[in-house]
Amino acid sequence: MSTIRVKFSKKDEMKYISHLDLMRLFQRAFRRAGIPVRYSQGFNPHPKFSLATALPIGVTSDGEYMDVELENDIDKDEFIKRLNDVLPRGVRILSSKYIKTGKSLMSLIEWSDYVIEFCTTDGISKEDMENCIREILKKDEIYIKKVKIKNKKETIKEVDIRSSIKNLNLLVVEDKRIIIRTTLKSGSKGNLKPKYIIDIINKTGNIEIVDDSIKIHRLELYSQKNGNLVSPLNCE
Amino acid sequence: MINKDTLDKILSRVEKPARYIGNEINSYKKNTKEVKVRFAFAFPDIYEVGMSHLGLHILYNLLNKEEDVFCERVFAPWIDMEHELRKHNIPLYALESKDPINKFDFVGFTLQYEMSYTNILNMLDLGHIPLLSKDRKEEDPFIIAGGPCAYNPEPLADIIDFFVIGESEELILEIIEAYKKWKENNRTREEFLEDVSQIKGVYVPKFYEVTYNQDGTIKEFTPKAQRYPSVIKKRIIKKLDEVYFPDRVIVPYIETVHDRVMLEIFRGCTRGCRFCQAGMIYRPVRERSVDKLLDHAQKLVEITGHEEISLSSLSTSDYSKLEELVKSLINKFKDKKIGLSLPSLRLDSFSLDIIQEIQKVRKTGLTFAPEAGSQRLRDIINKGINEEDLINSVRDAFYLGWSTVKLYFMIGLPYENYDDILGIKDLAYKVKDTYFGLPKDKRKGNLKVTVSTSCFVPKPFTPFQWFGQDTIETFKEKQKYLGSNIKDKKITYNFHDPELSFLEAVFARGDRKLSKVLIRAWQKGCKFDGWADYFNYEKWMETFREAGIDPSFYANRHREYNEILPWDFIDVGVSKKYLINENEKAKNGILTRDCRKGCTGCGINISFTGGVC
């Protein structure tokens, strides 16, 4: 009995599959692949695997992770091959590693690395965009409004999210198209959705952004070890 | 192919975008340039409903097994998606290639429910295909239809180019062959319709003429030329074990209504309930062998990875080797953590054993369908169960730990009176008394009895096809009467919308005059009529008024035996004489035995297997 940690991608039209649907997809893929996943005890047995974080619908990713408990060991490359043979286009297992069971995958994750692409209505110069980013990073506090719905009551909370932004870099400015890369707080100890970065850019630089032009791609998930960011595959 | 970027933007704005992306496991990908025939299997409801339909999976696989045929799927887009498609002028596309459906050779609709007819129109319109058969040009696809509602095709006569009557897997390839030949010879659209009119089981409405009497009933229904068959005989698969079985079922990304392996154990039903259309049109009974089923189950589990197998048929308990099958399935799949579900099970003590075994301890509710409240009425409809059976089963179930019971009834059945309605209440109370009659320590959970009544809809090819449906007012009165009599916290009463059942009755027994009503209603915005939120009764009534058609002529009118019914030209194998006889027996509450216990003379043997009857 051992646990295998898996890195996978979720791209193309598979970005429209919800977290719950993805869970079901894996459950069935394991069975098709003949992978000896452990099952929970009880009357309604469930395969024992857990995903690191939920990727929002519409976001693509090259850095998703899950832990799978196995009934008996199989070669890790064999594991990848068997699973990739039965997975739909868009979901690919990239790498895997047997791990010692310890902290849950979910509790390990602290940061997410994203690439965000969007278009501005009027176009913006490289300088202006760089200034905007510099200005954001210079701030000690950045307040955003988070809407919470509890018991059908909507409450709006002002939250300082400055500490949730680790990096913010400009990658491309090309006429109206802009690409940025950012590392944001992720996981159970705090989570900043990438769409808030767009809001902040919009507000700070007074930049008009075309609503349906936004494309978000997750590059990687990180755990933190001695102050450094490490992949969940290397955090032991 | 439609514009990918635009589609991408649209999909990020609609609810459940995975309905519209295709590319599921086991779906087919073919080079559209290399195939000779492109077929769009069209289901006039949303993805989740359509993907739960076994017939789709059968035909999809059957057609795609042919190398030069590419069958794709198209479903009715939900309201938000329709809005986006129209806004961006994107034609309705099939899921596999994302090509607009007007680029196909065939668009084939399955008719599962009368109230999905307006969705057919909506899908054609979204696919930029003319609504009326006569307006379609050479480059348009042929619009065909099959399924249970095709047994009365007349309300769609102006819309569908031709119908396939019976089990389509028996003749669809004959149609495809005819098409390939026709295409090679570069002939006209009209000529293809001529060709297929000669295939058994195909009905081309435009080759038939209907004249009417003064009172609106049919005077004559005749082929326009001698070469067209005057009777269309349904086509069926004779030996189910030898027939093609889909061993490669698509696994949806999102949860569908039946999100599991559907194992079809047999077709047909021998019980002979007089209200039941399926019981008449799907005759004779044809079973699959246990060996074949185990083999299919194994293959399907391997290729889909599903965690549950469900046995599908009209009445699971009637499968002759059920015990053997269930035990083998449990044995085979227990270790693989694959569950088994048995819908449509008659609840006797044997079934309870099975349910208990497969459900382990998870006690979901039990469902019983006595259909009518009194023994008199149950005999009239030939339901063949009595109160004692029901109460004994319920008592067994309570002993075994169940506490939630659902009871299904119909109101408005022929020859029903208010005592029969009160019988529904009495039965529910007896179920409750049975529970509380148990020693206290044997009662588990908290009793909940749910009584549901639907409104009886007389259907073609049933012994009750001549019967006038109750009016909406009568239905409401009866529902109110029953509701006011059920005064117990443990018993909940649910009832169906009579307005919807009224319309269902109109189209179930409608004639070809109704095609124009359908189009008008759709123009006024009617669609998804089977969905309570979208059904607009007022709009429908307005449409009937404008069209000068009285809907109650179809729903509420009593017919005489000598009247020519719109579907009389279709031969389902069960003779009209038998249906009349059954209706006469109903009047006197005389039972007809289950066909398994000896032939009851419906005629199916003569028609379809050449046997003595």
Image (cartoon, coloured by chain):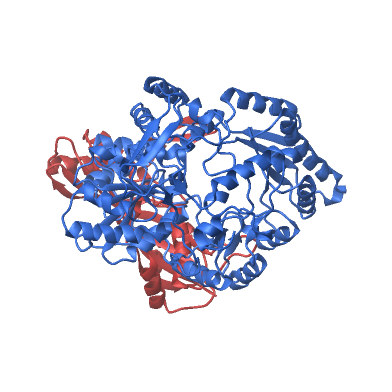
Chain colours: A red, B blue
- Near-viewer residue (B437 or B287): B287
| Residue A235: percent from left, percent from top | 42, 67
Using the image, determine if residue B66 lies above or below residue A189: below
Using the image, determine if residue B204 lies above or below residue A148: below
Residue B139 appears in view: yes
| Residue B397: percent from left, percent from top | 76, 52
Outermost residue, front side: B226
Quadrant for the C terminus of chain B in the image:
bottom right
> Is residue B133 found left or right of A102 in the rendered image?
left
- Near-viewer residue (A96 or B477): B477
Using the image, determine if residue A172 lies above or below residue A43: above
Residue at horizontal 53%, vertical 33%? B501
| Residue B604: percent from left, percent from top | 54, 56
- Near-viewer residue (B152 or A102): B152
> Is residue B57 found left or right of B32 in the rendered image?
right
Residue at horizontal 52%, vertical 63%? B610
Using the image, determine if residue B257 lies above or below residue B554: below
